[in-house]
Image: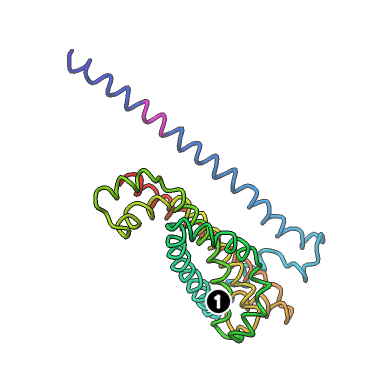
Amino acid sequence: MEAITHERPLDERNVVREIKNSAGRHQKVIKAASSAVPVLAFFLFWETAPRIGLVDPIIIPPLSADLQAIVTMVKSGVIFNHIAASLGRAGLGFVLSLLVGITLGILIGWNVRIKDTLNPLLTIIAQTSPIALFPFFIVVFGVGEVSKVGIIFWGCVWPILLNTISGVGHTDPLLVKAVRTMGATNWQIIRRVVFPASLPEIFPGIKISASYAILMLCAAEMLGAKAGLGYLVSYSQHVFQNANMYAAILLIAALGVIVNYLLLKAEKYVCHYRLSA
């Protein structure tokens, strides 16, 4: 009898836990389904509108025609050259903006006097549209790869830089003072306290910059590029291959979704690790 009375509460806890887990899974399914409905409705409208005459199918082909264009380009292998070129440019500009933005952000945010002096200037410069600076980059660097990577870097660096400065500034000063009294150097404080504490503010800037990288990539590749998804959009529009144009747009959107998903996963992992460490 004792064994039975001891096991019963454990069984009840297991049942309650299973019910909670089942309810959580049910909520996730409902949330995923509700998020998918608008997307599916949009794709359905895209497919049917040209077929029933709501829009000109020459201007906006049905979705199936655009997907078939992707399949054709995959079979020929030409699409992989464009994807590789775009990923190379966007990746290089984005990584450079990460290195420069986080490094300068920590250095500026660490020194209150420098931060107060430069913050208004940096805020003003950050508001300058990268697209408006296209002529400047072309005049200075030409129409080659440097100008394309440069404009992507310029668009990406500011959200990371400003968010890093803000994150460093919001680090608990009592925590910094406590670590300093233990004999930690400035580098140790930055590496072990300031940078980890700033990550929750840095990551939103990184996600914004990733979106800017895709946006700037498309615009940059429309000017003087010979390969890339942005170039494919521009070229297809000029030669009236609208299915290929929308196919490239779909691939650009898919690339943005994948990058955003990976960054969300990285943010959850890094911030969870920081809190549990």
Front-most of residues 155 and 220: 155
Characterize the magenta stretch by its predominant secondary structure. helix
From the top left corner, tell me how far across and down residue 91 is, in percent: 48, 71
Kind of residue at disc 1: Gly
229 left or right, relative to 276: right
From the top left corner, tell me how far across and down residue 228 is, in percent: 57, 78
Front-most of residues 43 and 117: 117
From where the camera sits, is residue 220 visible? yes
Front-most of residues 23 and 4: 23
Asked whether residue 126 is drawn in magenta, I would say: no
Dot 1, how many residues are within 10 Å of its Cα: few (below 14), some (14-19), or many (20+)? many
Q: Residue furthest top?
A: 1
From the top left corner, tell me how far across and down residue 216 is, in percent: 60, 70
Q: Residue at x 24, y 52 (%)?
A: 183
When asked about the image quadrant of residue 140, the answer is: bottom right
From the top left corner, tell me how far across and down residue 78 is, in percent: 55, 80
Q: Which residue is mark 1?
A: 150
In this rendering, is residue 93 above or below 163?
below
Image label count: 1
6 left or right, relative to 112: left
Read off the magenta span: 16-21
In this rendering, is residue 162 above or below 245?
above
Q: Residue at x 49, y 76 (%)?
A: 88
Secondary structure at badge 1 equals helix
From where the camera sits, is residue 258 visible? no
138 left or right, relative to 76: right
When asked about the image quadrant of residue 110, the answer is: bottom left
Front-most of residues 121 and 158: 121
When asked about the image quadrant of residue 190, the answer is: bottom left
